[in-house]
Image (cartoon, rainbow, N blue to C red):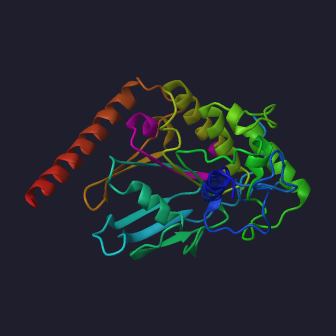
Amino acid sequence: MSATEPARDAATSGAAAAGRAGDTPDHAAAAGRTGDTPDHAAAAGHAGDAPDHAAAHLGTQPAPRSANDGWALHAERLSFAYGGASNTFADITLGVRPREIVALLGGSGCGKSTLLRVLAGLLPPSAGAVQFLGAPLTEPNPRSALVFQQASLLPWLNVTANVGFGLDFARQPTITRQQHEQRVQDAIAAVGLAGNEKRYPAALSGGMAQRVALARALARQPELLFADEPFSALDAITRADMQTLLVDVVHRWHTAALLVTHDIDEALLVADRIVLMGGRPGAIVREWQVDLPRPRLADSDALSRLRLDILAALQGVSTTASTSTESTI
């Protein structure tokens, strides 16, 4: 085995998980063939839009999908524990409506990233149940997609191939080569990377790499996009650009999104609804509906008042958790 093969295997695993964990490729997908572009790749995207229209072109409004009655995603009284350990979170009920952006906000260690993985079907709950598009969710669904903090791009594939990686996985809906190419092209255009299709990850900035990861998710045409702190490693200017892009593509592609974040300002600027999680074990503490027009200015009076309210609630949760910890020592 060459020295590069372990790194290659790790990158492949990360990219597959970023698109949809649990998929198995029909063939060796292009891994290891430097410079190859899969004949019908496609790893991340958007379920429900007809692939033959220009759903992703900037300024183009795709036809609305039939609205799912009630919730796109709904979880009832969820609890989760690793092995024989105590609960990471307990008795959580949470939903995301079609075409809604929900920010799951909380401090480090409250279990929000673990909750996202349970909601996405990557981990089984210890108690409770999850419904996705009106059906029980027991494993990752091809009509959802994930974006993580790390882009997890495959270094030997160019932008086009990375965006397309995974659309031929066994559990993905069967599409033609033409549909595949259109999905990838539309997704790349949607994130503003047209003209960069042949570039490789080593030639991309951090912000460009995250755009590729987002495009990989969009190429699946998801009904729901799960995003676990996808912009936390970026500089402030790039992060602001990516936050604006996320809102834009979610609204333009008529999908829903669940964004995990510890950044109050990010939640305020992006979300339609903010859900605060805290405590040990983690629980839903409060939520806020953000009925403010976009684009939102971080220094507006309305956002400033809401920020102070959220900050006070977050500090209250932290104080309660600290007191509870001290009482057990």
Q: Position of residue 3 (x, y in %)?
A: 65, 51
Foreground pick, 327 / 54: 327
Q: Is residue 264 magenta?
A: yes
Q: Is residue 128 magenta?
A: no
Residue at 27%, 62% in the rendered image: 281
Asked whether, in this view, residue 69 is left or right of residue 155, the answer is left
Give the image quarter of residue 266.
top left
Q: Position of residue 95 (x, y in %)?
A: 47, 61
Query: Magenta residues?
Result: 250-268
Residue at 42%, 60% in the rendered image: 114
Residue 295 can be seen in this image: no
Residue at 9%, 59% in the rendered image: 329
Give the vertical position of 175 relative to 269 (above or below). below
Q: Position of residue 58 (x, y in %)?
A: 75, 35
Residue 175 can be seen in this image: yes
Image quarter where the N terminus lies is: bottom right
Q: Position of residue 287 (x, y in %)?
A: 36, 50
Give the vertical position of 138 relative to 89 (above or below). below
Residue at 23%, 49% in the rendered image: 317
Asked whether, in this view, residue 274 is left or right of residue 320, the answer is right
Give the image quarter of residue 160.
top right
Total marks placed? 0
